[in-house]
Image (tube, helix red, strand yellow):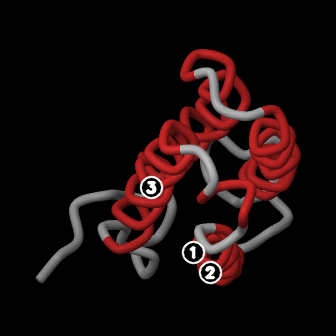
Amino acid sequence: MEKPISPSQHALIDYAYTGMQVMGPVAFGINDEAARTYQALSTGFLATNALTDTPYGLARVIPFENHQKADMGFLAGLSILTFSKTIRKDKRTLAFHLGMLSMAALNYFLTDYKREPER
């Protein structure tokens, strides 16, 4: 089965996701510690996306296949973060986190990482 998200679409989703990591905590009013955690995570997401070889990459030094490995690491990290007291102690923060984790997982599992990035 062909996956519906192309490398360039994935890159655009990643940029939107990074924006949600920065602005979402403010909009949803999650606890300050979790907000700082998400804003720190956004730096890694932004850097990885900006350096990936896609039409929207700024430096294009990371092959898209390696971007997949980074995504796997980010997804694992977000999954583990679910168990932190910072996330679990507040229902609003937990709901925000589970939403972000779900979106990251969908983007990962629906992306065709084997497809050649468009030029």
The vertical placement of 107 against 74, above or below, is: above
Secondary structure under the numbered disc 3 in the rendered image: helix
Q: Which label was assigned to residue 98?
A: 3
Residue 119 at least partly seen: no
Secondary structure under the numbered disc 1 in the rendered image: helix
Residue occupied by mark 2? 76
Residue occupied by mark 1? 79
The residue drawn where x is 69% and y is 80% is 73
Say whether marks 3 and 1 touch (CB < 8 Å). no
Q: Identify which amino acid the numbered label 3 is placed on.
A: Leu
Say whether marks 1 and 2 touch (CB < 8 Å). yes
The vertical placement of 4 against 45, above or below, is: below
Label whose residue precedes the other's in the sequence (2 or 3): 2
Residue 83 at least partly seen: yes
Quadrant assignment, res 111: bottom left
Quadrant assignment, res 115: bottom left
Q: Identify which amino acid the numbered label 1 is placed on.
A: Ser
Q: Position of residue 91 (x, y in %)?
A: 49, 44
